[in-house]
Each structure stands twice: as structure tokens, then as C-alpha cells.
Amino acid sequence: MTIRRIFSGALFATILVGCATAPSDERISAEAGAMLKASFKARGQAGLDRLDQDDTQRLCSELAGRTPSKEVADRIEKQNLATIKYPVDGKLSGDWKNGERIAQEGRGKQYSDDPKGPVGGNCYACHQLAPQEVAYGTIGPSLYRFGKLRGYAVEIERYAYAKIFNSEAFAACSMMPRFGHNGILSEQQIKDVTALLMDPASPVNQ
Amino acid sequence: MPGWRKRIGGLRWVAALAAAVCVGAGPASAQTSATDEIAKYRAALQDGNPAELWEARGEGLWKELRGPRKVSLEQCDLGLGAGVVTGAYARLPKYFADADRVMDLETRVVWCMVKLQGFSEADAKRNPFGSGNDKKSDIEALVAYITGESRGVKMNVALAHPKEIEMYRVGEKLFYYRGGPHDFGCVTCHNADNQRIRLQDLPNLTKVEGAQKAYTTWPAYRVSQGELRTFQWRLNDCFRQQRFPELEFGSDVSIALTMFLAKNANGAAFDGPAIKR
């Protein structure tokens, strides 16, 4: 056997081994799933079931930060749109003053939070709302003058309520939590935050 | 300790800043001045760093004869050979053949406490995150000392062993993993440039510059907590805020994410222990 033949044989073997050992994307995903189960412990109100993904979470995670295709986006938005429950009494807006408190409140659902304590929307973490609050985040768009800019029509009010209830119905893989669908905020709380956005007297619309 | 005096001065200054922000006039101008003033505050913090106290205590713990076997950690192999501390952190996490596992610094320190000093694993891991003088964490002190010995060393994490490559790829998957009642993942806050939560700047960890700046400045002395915090703590507290269950100290998820971020920070000089808000 010539040196060249030995060399090419070794190279071929290396490539074969390389192909055999480079784990597929599916295997890496399975590995990540198994690791998640072994790496967390239930604490306080946060049980291990929180690691399980629904269809929306799974599809958005698989995109690894990329924008979903139209097909995937349509699927996610359609599924989530079907979950929205509007108030039976027909009233979409509550009290903007309560809405402001809910928008400020960052507590709720963490294992360090009292399960009987307040649960907020923490809207200011990501959005500008009332101009008096300068400590606002920028992950989401500014909502300053939300109603004033769009008009106070019932369609806008309905959209605001629905968007808070389930953001994924309107923008697939949005970073915004699905406050109603996932039981973070109550119907009354969503009404109050809707009022913060839509009441002409709300500081957001001054 | 001149750093302490400066820090106390700095805290008073924060109170003044907070007052100034609260009486700010228009939203736009108040916003700009608030972020400017916070940048000044952060710069002022760099003058003196109480992390030195943790580093000094950690060096003592490293050399002290401890544990059931009454030996020091000076023969601990952090990846560059037994007893080599300088530059070791800049190459972690890495695969260790003796443990047949990819380990980050904290996991490796626990390993050495068990294998060399004879501590039980439970004892070695008992207090990873300290609180106050009554519950000081030995691990935080050891990590402060060891990381301090890599200050100025360029991050150089290898993906050589198949388990290192796998850890990195799993870490990347986990970075994008969204779950829990809020659908949050690392990606929620760390996927774009120039974003903030409230007034806190968020590094874009999907870019090299963002990963470099963030990773090379942990561990850090947190002024708001009065504690030195490790990267394990950083990950643990991110998952708490993501509304996940509790991330276990030294778990594979913590090591995979550390691997992903440390490797992405390659090429930047390590600059910890740092000081943060």
C-alpha cells in the first residue's frame, strides 16, 4: 500500500468518523430538552411543568431569533386568535388608575414572589406609557398617546384588549407575554390596562 | 480601603440623582439626562471595587488547609495543570477527562473541594450565593480570586472535544428556549441592540461585541446587593425573572449557557471581577 493510499484511507476514515459524530440538530434539541429536565428544581409557585412548551413557544424557539415565515406566522396567529375571550359584559375598559398600578407592578409568578401577592403586567419594563414615568424600557414600542394617536374608536379599544390578552394573535413570536391566555392578568386587570391606553383622561393620552 | 469611602460617597450621589430624575420636566429631556447621569454614576463606581475583599478572602481559602483531609486547593487543576491559576478562567468552560464532563469554574472548584479536600458534594455546594456577613459564600470568594488572576487575559475558550462542541450547541438552543407563563427566554431581552428594561441597558448577546462586554465583566460586585456575584448567580437570577423554576447550581443547563457565552466572548480581554449597579 502506498503512502498516498494510506493517507487517503485515513482521510476517508476521518471524514466518516466526523460525519458519524457531528450530532444532528434534532439530537441537540433532544439533548437540550433532557438537560432542562435535569437542571431545574421546582420552587415556590414555579413547578417543573413551566419547562414544557406549547406549540407557539416551540415554534418560536426553533426559529432561534429569526422572523417566522408567513406560513408559520399564520399558524401561530390563527391558533392564538382563537383563544381570545372578550368580556361577557361587553365592557372593554376599566379604571386607568388601576391600570397604571398594574403597569408599574413587576411582581408576580416568580418563585420568589408570594403566590398570594400582587401580580402585575410590568408594562413599563418594556414600554413607554405615561410621560411622568421616565424609567421605562425599550423592548416594546412606545405607547405614549396610544389612544390619542389612533382615535378612541371601539375597534381600537377591542384591539388593545385583545393584544394584551394574547399578543401572539397579532404578531407571531412577539416578545410580549400573553397576559390573558396564560392567566397572568385577570379580565378586570386587562380592562384596567386597556383603560390606561384608551381612556382620554389617562395620563398616557395627555 | 479608600474604595469604601468612595462607594459610600457614590451611594449618596445616587440618592441625589434619583431626586433629580423624579423632578425632571419633559419626558424626552428627563430621559436623556437620566441615562447620561447613570452612565456617569457607573463611571464613578469604577474608582474603587469592594470585589477586592472577596478576592483576598478567596486567595486565603485557596491556600488554607481545609476539609476532612486538611489540604489546600493549590493542587487543583483548573485546566492548565495542577496549581496553575493565572489565565485559567479565560479558557473555561472546558472538558475535563478526569470528570468526563465539561465544567465551568464553579463546577470545577466544587470538584476540587470534593476530590482534594474530601468535602461531600452537598457540603461543597451548600452556599453558592452568599448573603451578608453571617452567610458568606466560600465559592463566591474563590471565584473572585481565581477570575482576578485572569484579568487582562484574552478569552480563549476551545471547541475541541466533541463534548465541548455539543455543550456549545446545546447552550445556543437553550438561549432561544422560550417557556413559562410569560413565554420568556434569554432571547427575550438579549437579542437586539440598544434595548433596556426600565433604565437598565441590556447587552445583545447574539453579537460578539455584546457577548464580550457582558461575559468579561462577570463576576461583579453588585452595589445594589453589597455582594460579589458569579456568572452562575447571573444565570440563576435571569431564570427567576423569566418565571422558570430554579436553575440548579452547577447544572448542565448552566454550563451549556456559560459555554455558549464564553466562547462567543473569545478574543476580548477578561476584565473581572467588575463592579455593577
Image (spheres, rainbow, N blue to C red):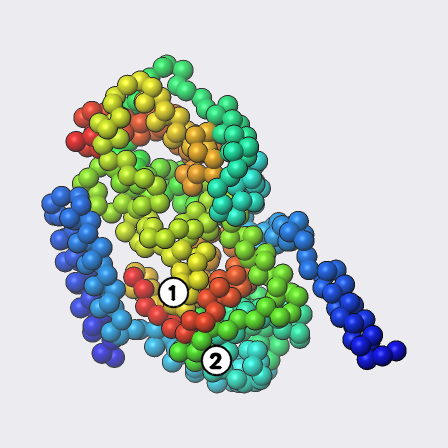
Is residue A119 positioned above or below B73 on the image?
A: above
The residue at 57%/61% (across/down) is B168
Percent of width and height locating residue B76: 56, 81
Is disc 2 placed on a helix, strand or loop? loop
Left or right: B272 as drawn, with respect to A10: left
Residue sitting farthest toward the top: A89
Instruction: Using the image as rendered, state which of residue B190 and residue B128 is in the foreground.
Output: B190
Subunit bearing disc 2: B
- Compared with B71, A83 (above or below) is above
Quarter in which the C terminus of chain B is drawn: bottom left
Q: Position of residue B138 (x, y in %)?
A: 46, 72
> Do badges 1 and 2 share one subunit?
yes
> Residue at (27%, 40%) from the top-left corner?
A128
In the image: residue A92, left or right of residue B99: left
- Percent x, y of residue B262: 49, 66
Residue B87 circle label: 2
Task: Judge by depth and name the residue closer to the eye, A104 or A56.
Answer: A56
What residue is shown at x 44% (from left), y 38% (from top)?
A174
First of labels 1, 2 by sequence position: 2
Q: Quadrant of residue B130?
A: bottom left
Instruction: From the image, tell me which residue sits under label 1.
Output: B213
